[in-house]
Amino acid sequence: MIPVMTPIYTALTHYIAENTLRLHMPGHVGIAEAWPLTWGKLASFDVTEIPGMDDLHLPTDVIEQARQLLAQAFGAQESFFLVNGVTSGIQALFLALPANAKVLIPRHAHRSFFAGMVLSGTNPVYLPAEINEETGLSLATSVEAVESALQSNEAVAAVFLTSPTYYGTVSDIKGIATAAHRRGIPVYVDEAHGSHCGFHPDYPMPALQAGADAVVHGLHKTLPVLNQGGALHLGDSFGPVDQITRAYSLLTTTSPSYPLLASMDLARHFMQQEGFDHLEKACQLADEYSERINQLPGLQCWGTKLSAPGVVAIDPLKILVMTEALPMTGLEVGRRLRQEYHIQLEIEAEHHILAMMSMFHQRSDWERFYRALQSITKEPGDGKANRRIKPVVPPAPVVIKSPREAFYSHNKRVALTEAGNRVSAEMVAVYPPGIPSLLPGEMITEEIWDYLNYIRQTGFQVQGPLDNRLETIAVLDL
Ligand SMILES: Cc1ncc(COP(=O)(O)O)c(C=O)c1O
């Protein structure tokens, strides 16, 4: 067999060229009649596990070849295509751990960690969120925090971190892996926002290279991949793969999208061929424009020069701009960018905005963003000055029931005034930075109760509870 560079995509193009009458799923049978014209090609790529297209659950043919190419490209022992986003890779890693395992997790982890713990029955040991004074955001997990948690907690089965964060900040995975491996504990990294990093040396070092045992990538977040496309990569040190393969199959749909698989196949090939040049250009533009944005009155944009404890590298393409010195909030900046300049940010918050730039943005796109910010900063604003979000660290959680036990317990809604010393059935996270102050199964201690009242009175935006004014809260009915 002649090796092909993009096996899934190539098999699909051959199938389309045969002009077969499709009497198989999906229901559109490759004809885009109900869709806009531009969708026509995509529909013809959307097939099912017919002969020649392999089986994602038991790959032996084109998917297996593509999986091997994926693993080679990312320096993994083995890689799995994820068709339900990073979420399913994170859940699979939890499920593959021993039953009721103890796992060290930073409090700023994505909500998919919580789902992984509900599914697997894992008992979390939380690393408190370390809030960076300058930004009010949780940007890293320090080696010291991991060391000290490992010293005071026995029988930890894994350390599972997030790096880069949503803001592009990278923790010292090498140091953390050394500390954990010394005790025989594996390190897993949610590297959802870092799939592109390994294709250019000026970007942060990929976690797998830094010593992580397993890594989950959100390929759709930074590479040209359709939504939901991700990868689970296992390092050489991961050990036997049977249990993780079973967990992956348990969580993965039996109807994977072939356009999605093909987009991952194509993106991997593209990155190997052209990734370096694209990332090089993007990095230069990012450096130049971070500097220029930083010169605008009222804005602070450190780019990769931000120095924060625990942060060893920064993705240059995450443009975090602090807006505190402006006579308007970051929310207002975001609203104006969208409404007046047709520019949609990744996120806007009270004291910052975050633009997620890609290697496909041209100089003209960066210039347009810069000019819009330049005009906005010249305007008088809405009079609502930024409130400095106090970097109040939520009190350390007291876990009474595991996320799984809490999920299956009866609950009832009570007034917040009566919630003290009860066990919460809801998550409460001040947003931003979105770090849970409380998760299901955790005690509403006096300290946490005071903290909840504080966030209710200050009117910070809260994620999690059905009653987001926090007048009531669901508690376990024990
Ligand atoms: C850090 C992090 N981890 C995991 C996820 C989940 O990714 P997905 O939506 O691909 O399941 C996200 C999503 O935004 C994320 O930001």
Image: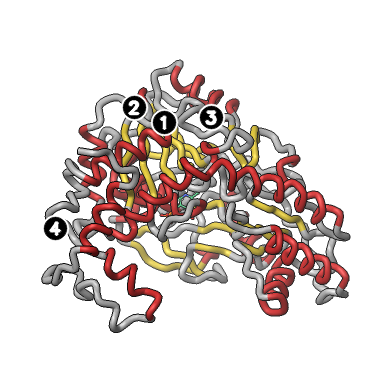
The residue indicated by pointer 4 is: 50
- On whether ligand 1 comes within 8 Å of the CB at mark 1, the answer is no
Question: Mark 3 vs mark 1: which is more N-terminal?
Answer: 1
The residue indicated by pointer 2 is: 238
Give the total number of marks visible in the rendering. Answer: 4
Image marks 2 and 3: residues in contact by CB distance under 8 Å: no
Q: Nearer the viewer, mark 3 or mark 1?
A: 1
Q: Amino acid at mark 3?
A: Ile
Label 1 residue SS: loop
**Cα gap from disc 4 to disc 2, whole angstroms:** 33 Å
Q: Amino acid at mark 2?
A: Phe
**Cα gap from disc 4 to disc 1, whole angstroms:** 30 Å
Q: In the rendered structure, find residue 75 and report the number of the disc placed on it.
A: 1
**Cα gap from disc 3 to disc 4, whole angstroms:** 42 Å
Q: In the rendered structure, find residue 386 and report the number of the disc placed on it.
A: none
Q: Amino acid at mark 4?
A: Ile
